[in-house]
Image: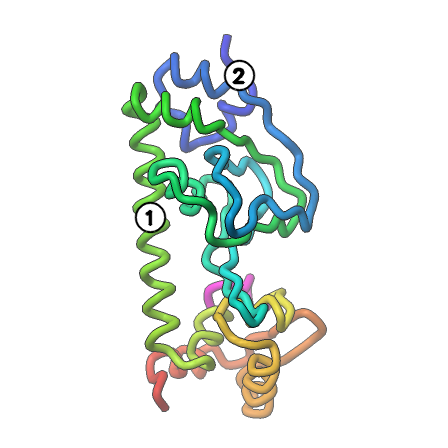
Amino acid sequence: MIAGWVDTAQELAALEPTARAAMARLTPMEVPEDTCLFSPGDVVKGYVIVLDGHVGVHLVGPNGRDILLYEVTPGESCIQSTLGLLGGDDYSAEAVVTRPTRLVLVPRPVFLELIDTSPAFRKVVFAAFAERMQAMMQLIETMAFLRVEARMAALILDRAEGDRLTMTQAEIARAIGSAREVVSRRLDRLARLGVIGRERGQVIILDRAALERIIAHPAV
């Protein structure tokens, strides 16, 4: 009987028996927080499936500043790994585990064999790839056309749990592609206007409508 981690990964539920058997032979690994999974120039060794936890993938500039390209949580894919496996390119970004994470690495030979032989696996990979590409296009649009304050307002509304966003200034800066000092000034301004409140490591939404207006009228 095939059991174990494969049964917990909902995105793999439709795999054919032979594909499930191949996946079930792989062993999940526990990765501690702050582990760097890959860096620019590293060879892509396999397809990452996150079972539990969180991985942030960043693009690092020559000046040391980095932008959060995307996050990998359970059920989501790493577009950098997919591109490398299908196209043969090395990694061009950096992936860091942001909290204790359980994941499976599907080695390149197994990945390519399943792509060739399993229609269900191909569907999983390309559906996840398409969804991630759409998110990347939205990121490019946001970075190109929204000013910092609008990007920050969108992040606060999108990531807040209830009326609280738990992120440091540095994390917010990475997520919106800005500098921590710029984020600090914008947060101070919003706090003076009564739009948000601030506690250590948290942003409290006081006027949701004002944040929505900032997004709707980014040039104001």
- For label 2, the residue is 25
28 vs 214, nearest the viewer = 28
Sequence-first disc among 1 and 2: 2
Q: Is residue 135 above or below residue 18?
A: below
- Looking at the image, how many numbered discs can be counted on the residues? 2
- Coloured how? rainbow
Q: Label 2: how many residues lie within 10 Å, few (<14), some (14-19) or many (20+)?
A: few
Residue 193: x and y, percent?
54, 91
Q: Which residues fall within the magenta stretch?
A: 157-165
Spatial separation of the CA atoms under disc 1 and disc 2: 28 Å
Q: Label 1: how many residues lie within 10 Å, few (<14), some (14-19) or many (20+)?
A: few
Q: Furthest residue to the top?
A: 1
- For label 1, the residue is 131
- The residue drawn where x is 56% and y is 83% is 182
Q: Amino acid at mark 2?
A: Arg
- The residue drawn where x is 37% and y is 50% is 132
187 vs 91, nearest the viewer = 91
Residue 203: x and y, percent?
61, 73
150 vs 204, nearest the viewer = 150
Q: Nearer the viewer, mark 1 or mark 2?
A: 2
Q: Quadrant of the C terminus?
A: bottom left
- Tell me the element at label 1: helix
Q: Amino acid at mark 1?
A: Glu
- Asked if the stretch drawn in magenta spans residue 164, the answer is yes
- Dot label at residue 164: none
User: Is 193 left or right of 126, judged from the image as shown?
Assistant: right
Q: Is residue 164 above or below residue 57?
A: below
Give the quadrant of residue 37: top right
Residue 108: x and y, percent?
45, 28
- Asked if the stretch drawn in magenta spans residue 120, the answer is no
- The residue drawn where x is 45% and y is 39% is 75
User: Is 127 left or right of 63, judged from the image as shown?
Assistant: left
